[in-house]
Amino acid sequence: MFKAKTQIDVHNGKKAIERIGRVSDNLIGIGPFGIGLDGILAWVPGLGEAYSIGAGAALVLEGYRARVPASVLVQAGVLVSIRTLANIFPVLGGVIVDFFRGHRMAARLLVQAIDDTLYIEGVPDRDHPEYAGVLARIRSGEERRRVVFLG
């Protein structure tokens, strides 16, 4: 029940991931630079860490719901952990907090994994026309996508 069952669930999860990444690390943007809620709250002891952990957990959970590969979930978790642990060390951490956009990087990884996946609703059916076509292209080397049945 927790995992996505329809393409709408996957779409909504992808939008949530994008929103978390944007709000966390690019709420206020000026050209290529920006600061997000995570950077602002990092200067409040305890609150920055709590937000960073919560936003990171939400990213990883939405990725899990969208059935992103475990290797990508681990990478996203590591990026968010680096970002969260940076808050603990005040001198070096302050610089990292302002410039290391771990949540946004993790969100991009998760969104890329979702985009590289073909989601087919229903139970696994090897005779599904979309599945057969994609499988043929994958085997021939024309395409590199995962196929996930949402049933």
Image (spheres, helix red, strand yellow):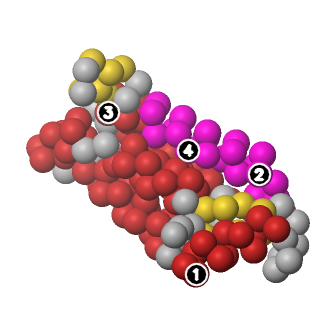
**Which sits earlier in the primary sequence, circle 2 or circle 4?**
2
Q: Give whichever of discs 2 and 1 has the lower sequence position.
A: 2
- 50 to 142, vertically: above or below: above
The amino acid at mark 3 is Gly
* Three-letter code for the amino acid on which mark 2 is drawn: Gln
Q: Which secondary structure lies at badge 2?
A: helix
Which image quarter is the N terminus in?
A: bottom right
Q: CA distance from mark 3 to mark 1?
A: 45 Å
Q: Position of 131 compared to 46: left or right?
A: right
Residue at 47%, 66% (x, y): give it. 72
Q: Earlier in the sequence, mark 3 or mark 4?
A: 4
Residue that numbered label 4 is attached to: 17
Region in magenta:
1-23
Viewer-nearest of discs 3 and 4: 4
Query: What amino acid type should be assigned to the residue bearing mark 1?
Result: Arg
* Residue named by callout 2: 7
Q: Say whether residue 122 is left or right of residue 67.
A: right
- Residue 106 in percent (x, y) is at 42, 52
How crowded is the residue under tag 1: few (<14 C-alpha within 10 Å), some, or many (20+)?
Answer: few
Label 2 vs label 1: CA separation?
24 Å
Of discs 3 and 1, which sits in the foreground?
1
Mark 1 lies on residue: 139
Q: Residue at x 44, y 48 (%)?
A: 108
Q: Quadrant of residue 16?
A: top right
Q: Residues within 10 Å of mark 4 (few under 14, many from 20)?
A: many
Q: Closer to the N terminus: mark 3 or mark 1? A: 3
Please give the label number shown on residue 39.
Answer: 3
Query: Alpha carbon of mark 3 to alpha carbon of mark 4: how far?
Result: 18 Å
Disc 3 packing (10 Å; few <14; some 14–19; many ≥20): many
Q: Is residue 24 visible?
A: yes
